[in-house]
Image (spheres, rainbow, N blue to C red):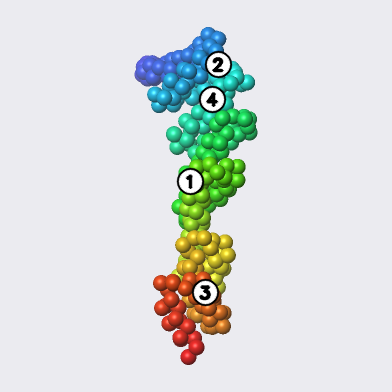
Amino acid sequence: MILKKNIFWLFPPFLALITFFCFESCKNTEVLRTGSSAEDLYNKAMSYYKDEDYYEAQQYFDILKLQYPASIYADDAQYYLAEINFKKGEFVLAAYNYNYLRRAYPNSEFYKEAMFKTALSYYELSPTYDRDQEYTFKAIQAFAEFQAFFPQDSLSKIANEKIIELRDKLGHREFFTAELYRKLYSPRASLIYYDAVIEDYPDTKYYELAYVGKIEVLYELFRYDEALGLIKLFRQIFPNSSYLDKIKSLESSMIK
């Protein structure tokens, strides 16, 4: 008897859930049955989109793509599906949908925006410098691709600023690793990462710091000839460096 009562008590929320899914299914089925035109579906979707009801907008854009894949609104639907993902912070899905638009609708009026927003999605996915940088590299590549396609576009300037920022992050990662190895008393390992900054990221603020760090490590390893040669090069590259006094002090201690 108690078991029956407990089962009966569970039915109301269960029935409510079933009713909800039936309602949603029937609503979408009704849209399909009414034979709404592509334009009607698009207008309905855009109405929800402008009201920031992204769930409903997404439903109608999906139906539009399904029912009218070759219509003049198909690429619009694809673009706004990507935009919905982006606005919701679903950047992996956003990048996928922007890329899909470029592949499926290469003549779309949204092609340029989709290319830029693909890069911007990867940019948003780029983590702090001490994490895996897969999306940082993807973002740099995507922004560079945009610049190659649209070199005169105003967005190319923004793309360039993003590339500089992202490369600075990569330089920071290499420099941070070099400094970490110094703290762990692994000077030879630190030299590898200082060299990585010097060779791969000369356009970042860590370029000068990497030279200073490398000179200090060479000094600590008693590799004076290499250190003195690097000091000479440092003065040529950074004639106005704020680290010149420190470098001069190291140099003096090596030539006594």
Q: Residues within 10 Å of mark 4 (few under 14, many from 20)?
A: many
Q: Is residue 115 visible?
A: yes
Residue type for callout 3: Gln
At a point 53% along the width and 81% down the height, the residue shown is: 228
Q: Residues within 10 Å of mark 2 (few under 14, many from 20)?
A: many
Question: Closer to the N terminus: mark 3 or mark 2?
Answer: 2
Q: Which residue carries the number 1 mark? A: 158
Q: CA distance from mark 1 to mark 4?
A: 26 Å
Tags 3 and 2 touching, CB below 8 Å: no
At a point 54% along the width and 19% down the height, the residue shown is: 63
Residue type for callout 1: Ile
Residue 202: horizontal and vertical position, in percent? 53, 63
Q: Is residue 3 visible?
A: no
Residue 175: horizontal and vertical position, in percent? 49, 64
Q: Residue furthest front?
A: 152
Q: CA distance from mark 1 to mark 2?
A: 35 Å
Q: Which residue carries the number 4 mark? A: 77
The secondary element bearing badge 2 is classed as: helix
The secondary element bearing badge 4 is classed as: helix
Vertical position of residue 171 compared to residue 127: above or below = below
At a point 52% along the width and 74% down the height, the residue shown is: 236
Q: Residues within 10 Å of mark 3 (few under 14, many from 20)?
A: few
Q: Which residue carries the number 2 mark? A: 38
